[in-house]
Image: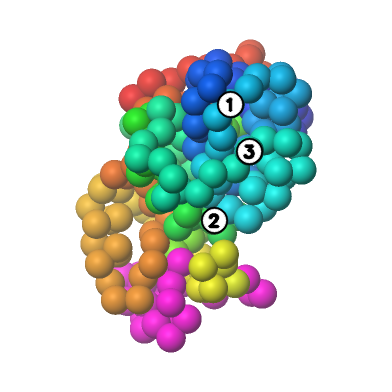
Amino acid sequence: MTQDELKTLVGQAALQYVTPDTVVGVGTGSTVDKFIDALAASGMRIAGAVSSSVRSTERMKALGIPVLDASEVESLQVYIDGADEIDRQGHMVKGGGAALTREKIVADLAKTFVCIADESKLVDVLGAFPVPVEVIPMAAAQIARRFRAMGAEPVLRKDCVTDNSCHILDVKGLRITDPAAFEAEVSQWPGVVTVGVFARNKAGVCLLGTAQGVRTMTF
Ligand SMILES: O=C(CO)[C@H](O)[C@H](O)COP(=O)(O)O
């Protein structure tokens, strides 16, 4: 199966976590696009979706899925989103699509984060994928220096302005053995909007697309 077919498989499989007439949190990316398409095609009626990006909002609206503002809900049963990396404890690296801040906000509203990913995303240790960090533009150089002092290599993402009018540093050369500590430390640096390590808001379930079918991992 191709990677695209694996994404379709897990996008479909995520439907089992959606309860009709409830509000669902929806992430961003090519795997989530498959979920959005599957949800629309299923004909299931939902009360609405809280979206994590302009991209997903536009896709859902075009398919007739009602989109609600995050401020309109107090909590969500589930948040469905992809990942750039996921480890065997459910910690993730996210933000390849530059939507990490809103993704973390919507994930934080949800009782369960359902991660949908093809098997290439499963890793033992996070950090081979450059870790996206959304930063206030005036702090980008200062934050980059801090990462260099850690022995990492931050790269300012070209031509990228986020939905929140901020910039992204993609940080290479990290080996994140304690995701919770890393997230807590970097999150408090002045000018950091969001670090793309999801430990506090880690996955509760991962639907992993493999050549043998969907493997369900619970954490
Ligand atoms: O974090 C994300 C966007 O900010 C995505 O979930 C992540 O980049 C995975 O994307 P894809 O499903 O296209 O592989």
Q: Quadrant of residue 15?
A: top right
Which residue is label 3 attached to? Answer: 66
Q: Residues within 10 Å of mark 2 (few under 14, many from 20)?
A: many
Residue 4 at x, y percent in the picture: 74, 33
Q: Is mark 2 within 8 Å of ligand 1?
A: yes
Mark 3 near mark 1, Cβ–Cβ under 8 Å?
yes
Residue occupying image coordinates x 30% and y 64%: 186
Relative to 146, does residue 109 appear above or below in the rendering? above
Badge number at residue 99? 2
Which kind of residue does numbered mark 1 sit on?
A: Ile
Q: Tell me the element at label 2.
A: loop
Instruction: Say left or right for 181 vs 52.
Output: left
Query: Which residue type carries mark 2?
Result: Ala
Q: Which quarter of the rendered picture does the N terminus lie within?
A: top right
Numbered range of the magenta stretch:
134-160
Disc 3 Cβ-to-ligand 1 distance below 8 Å: no
Judging depth in this view, the residue of 73 and 201 nearest the camera is: 73
Q: Is 129 positioned to the left or the right of 186 in the image?
A: right
Label 1, residues with CA under 10 Å away: few <14, some 14-19, many ≥20 = some
Quadrant into which the C terminus falls? top left
Vertical position of residue 190 compared to residue 86: above or below? below
Q: Earlier in the sequence, mark 2 or mark 1?
A: 1
Q: Which mark is residue 46?
A: 1
Disc 3 marks which amino acid? Pro
